[in-house]
Image (cartoon, helix red, strand yellow):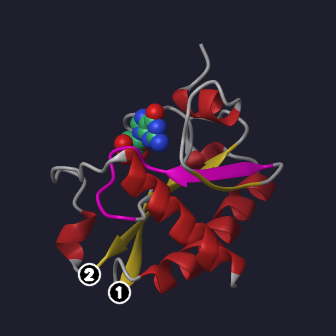
Amino acid sequence: MSSIFTRIIRRELPAYIITEDDKCIAFLDINPLAKGHTLVVPKIEVDYLFDLPDEIYSHLWSVSKRITRALDQCGWGTRVGVAVIGLEVPHAHIHLVPIRNLHDLDFSKPKLRLTSEEFEEIKNTIIACLSKL
Ligand code: 5GP
């Protein structure tokens, strides 16, 4: 069985995609902790981030840095918090979450409920910021 994220990569499931290249894809988390909560995911289906080949592992962090620079411009937080959890989806990913304080990175908090229009607007805002980098 392919992971949910592989199915997003193959376009079998929808997602609000921010950016993509031959090695990775980034899309909005469907149950976000904050506006702009983004997942950066390798295209190869490896469960644990730290089992990735070095080249892909480094690339994910480099793409994460670029997306963070864009999120920094979007105004949803004063910083971007980073988390590697992987308890729910067994396909490696990095969480990028705009935060203002420590509590904002608490994954046990209730998640935001956003409409598809809100997700779409957030996606377009991040893409616009990325394009200006
Ligand atoms: P983790 O595996 O790091 O514990 O959590 C997986 C994350 O993926 C969660 O924050 C969850 O909201 C997100 N997620 C789970 N299923 C989907 C999905 O189908 N689409 C998107 N965009 N995010 C998902």
Task: Tell me the chief SS of the magenta region.
Answer: loop
Instruction: Depth check: give the residue in front, 5 or 36.
Output: 36
The residue sitting at 42% across, 65% down in the picture is 36
Amino acid under disc 1: Thr
Q: Quadrant of residue 86?
A: top left
- The residue indicated by pointer 1 is 78
Separation (CA) of disc 2 from disc 1? 5 Å
Helix, strand or loop at mark 1: loop
Instruction: Depth check: give the residue in front, 114 or 44.
Output: 114
Image mark for residue 23: none
In the picture, which quadrant includes the C terminus?
A: bottom right
Circle 1 crowding by C-alpha within 10 Å: few under 14, some 14–19, many from 20:
some
Q: Percent x, y for residue 18?
A: 61, 58
Amino acid under disc 2: Arg
Residue 7 as seen in the image, left or right of residue 120:
right
Magenta region: which residues?
23-35
The residue sitting at 35% across, 77% down in the picture is 76
Task: Residue lying at the far top in this picture: please name it.
Answer: 1
The residue sitting at 45% across, 63% down in the picture is 122
- The residue indicated by pointer 2 is 100
Above/below status of 131 relative to 86: below
Helix, strand or loop at mark 2: loop
Are the residues flagged by discs 2 and 1 in contact, CB closer than 8 Å? yes
Task: Residue lying at the far right in this picture: please name it.
Answer: 22
